[in-house]
Amino acid sequence: MTSTETGVHAPPRPRLPVPSLRTDRWWLPPLLTVVGLSIFVIYATFRAFQQNYYWVEDYHYLTPFYSPCMSNGCLENAAHFGRFLPDHPLIPYAALSLPLLLLFRLTCYYYRKAYYRSFWLSPPACAVPEPHTRYTGETRLPLILQNVHRYFFYAAVIISVINTYDAILAFHSPDGGFGLGLGNIILVANVVLLWCYTLSCHSCRHVTGGRLKHFSKHPVRYWVWTKVSLLNTRHMEFAWITIGTLILTDLYVFLVASGAIADPRIIG
Amino acid sequence: MSYQGQFRVWRGDSDGGSLEDFEVEVNEGEVVLDIIHRLQATQAPDLAVRWNCKAGKCGSCSAEVNGRPRLLCMTRMSLFDKDEVITVTPLRTFSIVRDLVVDVSYNYEKAREVQEFTPPKDLAPGEYRMQQEDVQRSQEFRKCIECFLCQTTCHVVRDHEENKLAFSGPRYLIRIAELEMHPLDAADRTDTAQDDHGLGYCNITKCCTEVCPENIKITDNALIPMKERVAGRRYDPVVWLGNKLFKRGK
């Protein structure tokens, strides 16, 4: 422990000729993660700043990337909570919610694992050496700020309520009555899965009951904790599924709003 | 059906060593430890390997097979192709003693630094009626067999020898979590986990969970809940305000 050398070659560790002897395709999961997250970031950035094709007037479909729409540039019916943000090409119409959602995912325990491994290679895979000479983890700035994850969880809950409200308002037909189309099914499925991702969060698991020492003294919170814990085991899956459903939902609204496709209607 | 398997086994000590090639008979149903024993019996009688129960419960035969930390006694030969060269090396995070045996005393030093179970002083025997839901979280961590696979695969110390001073590793952080979640433990484990055992070094990349032969969800059920407790204690102004308003202690 007094040696200045570090890593798997540091004496008096066993001297092996190569840093890793893994023979499997350990590089594949981090590569897929880079590809998947990059696709999402590029698509979401393009759409957030496009400032068009986010609202279907006939059916009141609002894409989640523009919810809540609060810019002065928003179409009047798409702005369910008023318009007060300046209309500027560099300010997304949902500039209040998008940064919070981005930070919710950026500080998420699953995504941290994903990008620490794939982008920062710390480590790229288990028992595969990382390239960095020093490592301090989340003990100092900026990574110590990952500890504020639960605040973005609270914000995500509020935004999920807003997304749910949007999905309910979208049961709308051109004549003003109740309507149902393929877009409604997509919007509702997206909202349900967003709730699954949000409620399966590790911070949610902690605040609902995980912080308790005596479960038997808090039977309701214990029951909630068991349900959140069940969801929590699928947090990684929900993280990826919701990336897919967000892109799919936005793309669908984009295509219908731009007139590229027509929304198949079941009612109205 | 028997076949001749190709093996590369690290032989050496703190002065140096190398991978040596062996061809050893493999029989149906065998594990890597069986092959190592046959190697000792037939070709390398002085090969050093630590083992005991051969049932995945003593945690003695930890080593690295094709670069992955595993228990030799729980690694079935059927995992590998018959023509695959199987490389067996000692754990690469600890000091070498000889061949496949390493010095794991780092772990015992860290174990001694964990404050023992501390029940409330005024609690008389029989006063607390323990319910299953109160202890089931801690029970998961009691499955640990101290094989130290999580310790050896954790990049915090595997790739950074200098972090061994500040970081106790997943095994001892789950011990702290086990005590922290125990309803009768009165010690304050949150600050000590962060300050004395290096919880902040963990970047939750889950390698400890991946290699655990007891399938303990180390990251999800111990490390992240401990990080959340630290966040509540140190980085949560709402909790801080509540403590002030309602005069709650730590």
Image (tube, grey):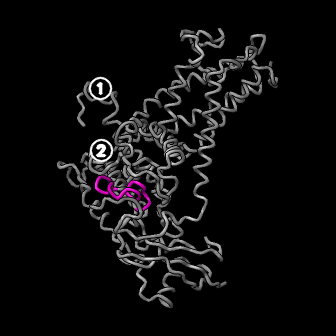
What residue did someone put label 2 on? B190
Image quarter (top left, top right, bottom left or bottom right) of the N terminus of chain A:
bottom left
In the image: residue A196, left or right of residue A263:
left
Name the residue nearer the viewer: B246 or B66: B66
Q: Is residue B7 visible?
A: yes
Residues tagged by mark 2 and mark 1 found on one chain of the structure? yes
A173 is within the stretch colored magenta? no
Percent position of residue B169, x then y? 36, 56
In the image, is A193 to the left or to the right of B212?
Answer: right
**Disc 1 target residue:** B241
Report the span colored magenta: B152-168
Q: Amino acid at mark 2?
A: Thr
Residue drawn at x 71%, y 30% is: A186
Apparent side of residue A176 relative to residue B249 in the rendered image (left or right): right
Q: Is residue B49 above or below residue A81?
A: below
Q: Chain of mark 1?
A: B
Which percent across, then down, holds residue B136? 41, 53
Q: Secondary structure at mark 1?
A: helix
Image location (x, y in percent) of residue A124: 52, 52
Q: Could you tell which of marks 2 and 1 lies nearer the N-terminus? A: 2
Residue at 29% across / 65% down in the picture? B108
Give neighbour class at mark 1: few <14, some 14-19, many 20+ (Cα, 10 Å): few
Q: In the rendered view of the protein, which quadrant contains the C terminus of chain A?
A: top right
How many circles with numbers are drawn on the protein?
Answer: 2
Relative to A64, does residue A25 appear above or below in the rendering?
A: below
